[in-house]
Image (spheres, rainbow, N blue to C red):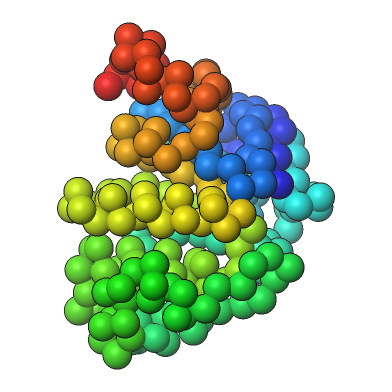
Amino acid sequence: MLEITGIETFYGETQALFGPSLRVGEGEIVALLGPNGAGKTTTLRSILGLSPPRRGTIRFDGQDITRMATHRISRLGIGWVPDDRRVFPMLTGRRNLALGARRTRFRAWTQEEMCEVFPALQHLFSRDCEAMSGGELQMIAISRALLGSPGIVLFDEPSQGLAPKVVQDVLRTVRRMKSEGVSCLIVEQNALAALQVADRVYIMDRGRIVHDGPAQELLDNPAKRRRLIGM
Ligand code: ATP
């Protein structure tokens, strides 16, 4: 589904990624963990065409997307749930959702289904996003991504700033997406939350992948987990 091979991404002359390779299979949930500044967000930005890599390749659904424009990448079926949500604050929930709606070759999701996933969503349709809490904005951001009919959704710190109950709602949604065949790549500081839903995990440090393996292995082996992610 998504395959990244040896990408090198720079901010000006500063190199942030030193050749990480990773893959996400169809309907697979992959967590990308690591300390601040490891390059997790830059990896997502590279996939989305916001910071295209200078070297290496990124393939999605059989196509080379390495230096494709961001709007074309999203039309192919790559959804994004950014850490700062990026909604239009002066627009209602409904208008923000409408802006994300798109058909691709992947499963189409409807507003009705999103209300079933998040029962509280229907109360947000007529409210302006500037009046919403962090958890409500996250519901809008996830629903907007799914209404874009993605084959894969990239999550940047989905649990950041959310109450534990809302984090569990987000994790439940990720499991539902998987059961419907949608792949997820999740960048998280809250490693334990990500490990609860992930099939596999990659750990980054200073722009490189330093570990990959099944998520269950880190859940079962606290000593190894502490050595690799410090928790
Ligand atoms: P965090 O969780 O703190 O966001 P991260 O693993 O997502 O960490 P990145 O944000 O991808 O890490 O940062 C990787 C490296 O790139 C860091 O050294 C960071 O300082 C640098 N970097 C990130 N954004 C920029 C930018 N806009 N300009 C210059 N350097 C940047």
Q: Is residue 194 left or right of residue 7?
A: left
**Which image quadrant for residue 115?**
bottom left
Q: Nearer the viewer, residue 12 or 111?
A: 111
Quarter the C terminus occupies: top left
Q: Quick check: 145 above or below 16?
A: below
> With 83 as the anchor, is 18 left or right in this view?
right
Residue 179 visible, this angle: yes
Q: Residue furthest bottom?
A: 126
Q: Looking at this view, is 152 or 182 the one in front? A: 182
Image height check: is 86 above or below 14? Answer: below
At which x and y percent is residue 6?
Answer: 70, 30
Question: Where does residue 82 sit, x and y in percent of width and height?
Answer: 42, 57
What residue appears at the point 54 percent right and 22 percent down from the top-left corner?
Answer: 213
Residue 51 at what x, y percent from top left? Answer: 59, 50
Instruction: Give the residue at x 41% y 57%.
Output: 173
Residue 162 position in % (x across, y down):
22, 54
- Which sits in the foreground, 116 or 109? 116
* Image-based side of 153 in relation to 165, left or right: right
Q: Residue at x 46, y 44 (%)?
A: 186
Residue at 19% of width from left, 48% of height from top? 164
Q: Nearer the viewer, residue 144 or 19?
A: 144
Number of on-image labels:
0
Residue 141 seen from this side: no
Q: Is residue 163 above or below residue 228?
A: below
